[in-house]
Amino acid sequence: MEERTVDLSLYTLVRECLLDPNLMKDVFYMFSLSNRENVHEIFKYKKFNDDFTDRVTCYRKDGELIGTVRPCYDEFLEKLVRILNIPTRGKVTDSVELDKKMRERLEILKNISSESELLMEFPLLYKDLNDGRRYYNDVQKLRRQENYDEEAFASGEHYYYGCALKKSLPNFIKSQSLQYERYINDRNKLKELQESKSYNGIIRKYFNIDKFYMYTIHEYLRRCEGTKDKEEIKKYLKLVEDYLNGSRDKSVSFKTDEGIKIDYDNIMKRYNNLKRIVSDNSSFVDWILVPEGRDYSRVEKKEEAQVTLMSLEEINRLRGLGEVKRNFYETSPYLAKAIGLRRYHGYIAYIYENGKVILDREYIPEHPATALGDAIYVMKAIDFENLSKLDKQVLMKHPKVGRMIHSKKWKERVQLVIDYEGSEEEKQDAVQLVKRLQEKK
């Protein structure tokens, strides 16, 4: 039985792993055309500017290191949720609850009666409507020029041309409601079709297989870094070990969409760090580390009704910063970690041999904004159990607490804390703190 393992960025794959960089546009178009055909086969009509080909997915069987590369259904689902403006927390997965939310949003779409209402409820569809109108005006200008090829704009599959033909808001709402109803009703048919496809022929013909393998291993490691399930980490680390012990050329290197350089040294560093995490005895304390000083139940309900739309570039930028932050702490020489009641959705305390404790917000890949925005707090090990229970408003003014923000040189300032020599008494305080926390487990 096949197992879905990881997604790969098609942009990274095409930009970094092609044998002939001159074929970038042609090969990317091959992937796009293939998935356009999948989408069109199921829905009979598609949005011209949404091919759902930003990512591909790897599936493997026992004994395989990589397996089969296929279209990514999750990407289609995530974009559908985004266009329908459905607030989400964490990874988007198909479920009865998600189906209910999508159908509720569809009913709201059907009853839109003004453009201001469309902008408020469905900002991405509002943008499509106006892009369609602009496109229609451009078509009219081109028609007045010589050698104008009307057939190039007359395709019934061209999304913006379709929007232009339905310039009035009622017609636009009607056409979009029918379209997204099909997307919701028939989405599992698309999933079945995509999971029957294979891009392996394209991979073998046009790609540097050694780079492709290293990129996939990098994503295996990233998946490990994004979970706290030690059994899952062990499973993926076994695959990384198989790669490291194999005969693939490991002198290759590439850069991710976030600009992070990946090579053999990077792979080994992260692999060894994850092995340490698997054997790490982190302590869970029975209080919230650095609470906000507000009623979370009310705040979360309020925030759930909002959705923040970020560009792909901003998401990639934040994810890159988040990975840098996480790798910085996890490769630092801490004695132990303390994790509060909010578990990995709050602050984590890193306890160092020199008697210093550094508290920083855990980076959550599904929430890129957690890469920045929360201050760093520094305190002595002997004070940790009392001070870490205080909220931010108190801590930022407390004489025994140091506070830093994630400015350009935050790592250098934190490194100074880590490199602090510490007295024998402070070092003993750190050992005793770790012992007390371990005893409470």
Image (tube, helix red, strand yellow):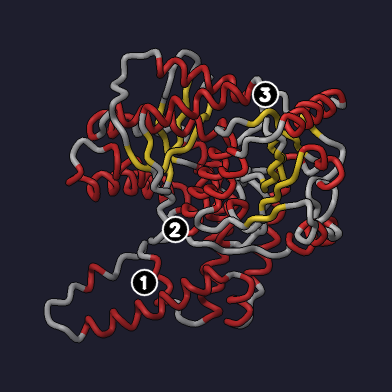
Q: Is disc 1 in contact with disc 2, using a CB cutoff of under 8 Å?
A: no
Q: Earlier in the sequence, mark 3 or mark 1?
A: 1
Is 309 positioned to the left or the right of 164 in the image? Answer: right
> Is residue 407 in view from this perspective?
yes
- SS state under label 1: helix
| Residue in front for this viewpoint, 236 or 42 | 236
Tag in front: 3 or 1: 3
Of label 3 and label 2, which has the lower sequence position? 3
Residue pictured at 55% horizontal, 58% vertical: 407
Say which mark, if any, is on residue 161.
Answer: 1
- The x, y position of residue 231, in whole percent, is 65, 21
User: In the picture shown, does residue 394 fall above or below 383?
Assistant: below
Q: Name the amino acid type tagged 2.
A: Glu
**Residue 157, image x, y percentages:** 36, 62
Question: Would residue 389 appear left or right of 146 to someone viewing this image?
Answer: right
Dividing the picture into quarters, in which one does residue 88 lie? bottom right
Could you say whether the residue bearing mark 2 is in a helix, strand or loop?
Answer: helix
Answer above or below: position of 302 versus 423. Answer: below
| 226 or 272: nearer the viewer | 272
Residue at coordinates 80% horizontally, 31% vertically from top-left? 433
Give the image location of residue 326, x and y in percent.
57, 41
Distance in Å between CA atoms under marks 3 and 1: 57 Å
The residue carrying mark 3 is 280
Q: Which mark is residue 211?
A: none
Say few, some or many: other residues with alpha carbon within 10 Å of mark 1 (under 14 / 14 to 19 / 20 or more): many
Which amino acid does the dot numbered 3 rest on? Asp
How many angstroms separate mark 3 from mark 2 (CA)?
Answer: 34 Å
C-alpha span from label 1 to label 2: 27 Å
Of residues 362 and 384, which is closer to you in this image? 384
Tell me which amino acid carries mark 1. Answer: Tyr
Disc sitting over residue 313 in the figure? 2
